[in-house]
Image: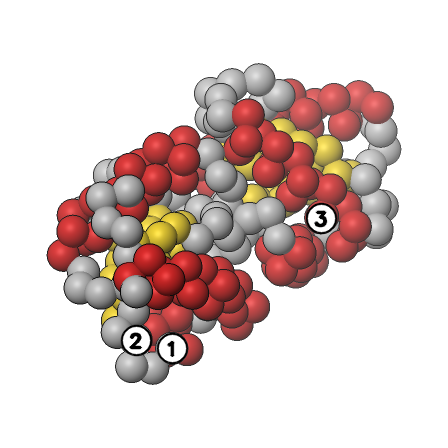
Amino acid sequence: MTTLVACSHGTRDRAGQAAIAGLVDAVAGALPGLAVAPTFVDVQHPQVAEVVTDTGGPTVVVPLLLSSGYHVHVDIAAAVAEREDVVAAPALGPDPVLAGLLAKRLRQAGMGTSDRVVLAAAASSDPLARRDTERAAALLATALGRPVALGHVGAGRDTVAAVVAEERRRYPYARVAVASYLLAPGWFRDRLDEVGADLVSAPLLDGAEPDARLTGLVVRRFLDARPQAYAHAA
């Protein structure tokens, strides 16, 4: 039997922990009979290397991460390198499914037709992660049919607060809406309430039942990668 290892970042925020657990449960419900194991790359346990060591048979690690940064290319890559029948799927983002969910969250937050939009992504020094967030902003712009600026929350350049301020300078009569390109509640989402925007959307997991499109994206990442695990196990 193949095992799906659902690997998220990890958080101390209880709402964030519950949101991720709800997504993992939804994925397990969508794949009855499949072993689904939650794991993390930071903060929480069990860590991904521990879980991969204990799985039996072909295993697919699906990163519950929105870009292909350090945790995908270093932490997860190191964990799957220990066994030939363990493979890693790509990160969840960027993907048009996520752009659609971001648009939904913005509408739920009260975005107007003339609002300026800033995509708020977790900061990263990894150039691959930055490329992915730039692509995510482009996909959201397509979904909304309007320009989308990109800002980062956390350490680094192009902070969300600075990008919001620049949007206000250039468009003084428009509201500024921030799209939270974050999987779950936690420290990063809390910081967005301090950036000076008129509205900030909820993260992709907002505490309610996970959107079926997000669950389906995780399942798709698993199904696309599963043949590789079987090929190495043969």
Q: Nearer the viewer, residue 2 or 133?
A: 2
N-term mark: 1 or 3? 1
Q: Position of residue 230 (x, y in %)?
A: 35, 65
Image quarter in which the C terminus is found: bottom left
Q: Position of residue 191 (x, y in %)?
A: 47, 33
Q: Secondary structure at mark 3?
A: helix
Mark 3, residue position: 140
| Residue type at numbered disc 2 | Leu
Measured in 3D between alpha carbons, the distance from the residue under mark 1 to the one under mark 2, in whole angstroms, is 6 Å
The quarter of the picture where residue 136 lies is top right
Does the CB distance between marks 2 and 3 fall below 8 Å?
A: no
| Residue type at numbered disc 3 | Leu
Residue 167, compared with residue 40, is above or below; it is above
Q: Residue 149 has which mark?
A: none
Q: Residue at x 34, y 82 (%)?
A: 32
Q: Secondary structure at mark 2?
A: loop
Q: Residues within 10 Å of mark 3 (few under 14, many from 20)?
A: many
Measured in 3D between alpha carbons, the distance from the residue under mark 2 to the one under mark 3, in whole angstroms, is 33 Å
Residue 54, compared with residue 186, is above or below; it is below
Mark 2, residue position: 34
Mark 1, residue position: 31
Q: Residues within 10 Å of mark 1 (few under 14, many from 20)?
A: few
Q: Nearer the viewer, residue 107 or 146?
A: 146
Does the CB distance between marks 1 and 3 fall below 8 Å?
A: no
On screen, residue 65 versus residue 115, left or right, reads left
| Residue 4 in sight in this render | no
On screen, residue 167 versus residue 151, left or right, reads right
Residue 97, compared with residue 199, is above or below; it is below
